[in-house]
Amino acid sequence: YTLSLHDALPISRGIPGDATLSLAESPNGRIFARVDAGLYSGDADHFEPVMTAEGPVLTDQYKEMIASADDHVLYVKDEVLMEARRTGGPGSLWQAHSLFSATTITAHPELNSIEGMLLANGTLWFGCGLRLCRFDGQKLEVFGAAEGVPEAHYGELLQDRSGALWARSLDHVVTLAR
């Protein structure tokens, strides 16, 4: 891509002509594209729908996705953090489910409203309700007023080169030291 030249992906490459609502790239360069018809996975030459036994994987519009591997993507559906994983080879069905169990969601109702996401050094950070959440694959930690994080919807997150997390809401910018 340059400022003066770009290519539109034609329908012949596998993505319907719907509006592209969000994009994510895996560490190996696989691209996930969310369009009205569902989630698609591919490279610059060919895309295929991310399909489960129940049908196409749909995500909430304009919510971030994180592709942690070519066969694994995190996304938001109905405000809940979901994951889709393909266990077979290309063309095989995907399995999609909530990242957290019903018990965990009941214990942490903020998990019913997911905002921005960031995967940094194997740890997932995300806005959850009016708080920030951190999940290392095993342990969920919630940061709120008691930890110095004002109540707000945190939609943008980044990790700086020192490892500190920065989170922005409409009214606040907070940083959590490494």
Image (cartoon, helix red, strand yellow):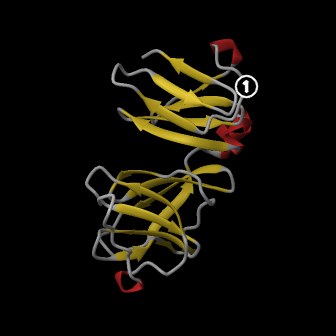
Query: Residue at the spot x=62%, y=42% of the render?
Result: 115
Q: Horizontal and vertical percent for residue 148? A: 64, 13
What residue appears at the point 73 percent right and 39 percent down from the top-left corner?
Answer: 106
Residue drawn at (46%, 70%), measured in percent from left and top? Answer: 50
Judge by depth and name the residue closer to the eye, 103 or 177: 177
Per the image, the residue denoted by label 1 is 151
x and y percent of residue 42 in the render? Answer: 34, 69
Quadrant of the image containing the C terminus: top left
In the image, taking residue 84 as reference, residue 5 lies left or right, namely left
Measured as percent of width and height from the top left, residue 77 is found at 63, 57
The reply, left or right, for residue 121 in relation to residue 132 is left
Q: Residue furthest front?
A: 4
Q: Nearer the viewer, residue 42 or 166?
A: 166
Residue at (33, 24) in percent of width and height: 161
Q: Position of residue 174 (x, y in %)?
A: 58, 21
Name the element at disc 1. loop
- In the image: residue 166, left or right of residue 76: left
